[in-house]
Image (cartoon, helix red, strand yellow):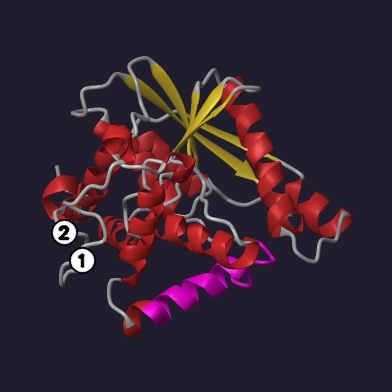
Amino acid sequence: MRKGKAAVQRVMGYMRKAITEFRMIENGDRIAVGVSGGKDSVALLVGLQQLRRFIGIEYEVVALTLDPGFGGQETDYSAIAALCAEYSIPYELRRTQIGKIVFDERKEKHPCSLCARLRRGALHDSAKELSCNKLALGHHFNDVVETFMLNLFKEGRIGCFAPVTYLSRKDLTMIRPLVFAPEKEISAAIRKNGLPVVKSICPADGATAREEMKSFLREREREDHGFTYRMFGALRRSGVDGWGYPESGLRNPEIDGKVRKTGLPAGSQTRTQL
């Protein structure tokens, strides 16, 4: 482990809490980690590999990258390949035509939905071809709140992606171990450890409804400290999409919507830094 060990340990603490609370991983699992090259997927990959040493669950980790081929270019993932070699993680890179389909053939004005569907399908198929029974994705705490708010504001419904989703047609389970980890803590872990990040060359990068929601939530947080954590608490209290608290989804008074001066839910420092 490089310098900045404490920052990585904090992220791993959030991961361990999510894995335990939502029973994401079991003995004998072979987990494909979707590695786009962004900071979240890199942190997820390193965290899952390091957790194998002490979490008390026997599982395997395989890194899986899909190159969308944006602009007809092959992205250089050599830094990710080197990282996987350093951590003794098998690495699979697959080139796709997703960028060509979305932007050149379909010429989508709002490309994110189609691109996400194509990537999900390719990830599911690739994970099964690699004999994996689980697929880990790098959605973090802020992604959860942003998705919850986007569904509420844009679609008029209460919901979010689930921490754990079983796909019966594929016999594949998707897990999201970073759902308790704030984005700023992931960024700090990547920066302080000098972990590699591959910049996205997606033509729509930074010009999406999600980016607008990020800006909205940052502004709300500045004006009303703790707003983001209260929205996360609302999602958990609703119990939708598998987000309820343990013990039949009853309210957890230790962390539910209570915010300390640090901006973390009350009790989170002891509960997540394990």
Q: Where is residue 157 in the image (x, y as percent from the top left)?
A: 58, 57
Q: Which mark is residue 266?
A: 2
State yes or no: residue 49 in magenta.
no
Q: What residue type is labelled 2?
A: Ala
Q: Main secondary structure of the magenta part?
A: helix
Question: Among all residues in the image, which is located at the extreme top?
Answer: 28
Q: Name the residue under label 1.
A: 259
Give the image quarter of residue 95: top right
Q: Residues within 10 Å of mark 1 (few under 14, many from 20)?
A: some
Residue at position x 41%, y 54% in the image: 235
From the top left corner, tell me how far across and down residue 271 is, in percent.
15, 46
Q: Do the residues labelled 2 and 1 touch (CB within 8 Å)?
A: yes
Residue 273 drawn above or below residue 64: below
Mark before the other along the chain sequence, 2 or 1? 1
State the residue lying farthest toward the right: 105
In magenta segment, residue 219: yes
**Residue 204 appears anywhere in the view:** yes
Image point 25% across, 38% down: which residue?
16
The local secondary structure at tag 2 comes to loop
Residue range highlighted in magenta: 202-220
Q: Using residue 169 as the reference point, say whether residue 241 is left or right of it.
A: left
Cα–Cα gap, marks 2 and 1: 6 Å
Instruction: Decide: few, some or many residues near mark 2? Use Cα within 10 Å; few <14, some 14-19, many ≥20.
Output: some
Q: Which residue is drawn at 43% across and 74% down?
A: 217
Q: Residue 17, percent across and down?
A: 25, 40
Can you say whether 90 is above or below 58 in the image?
A: below
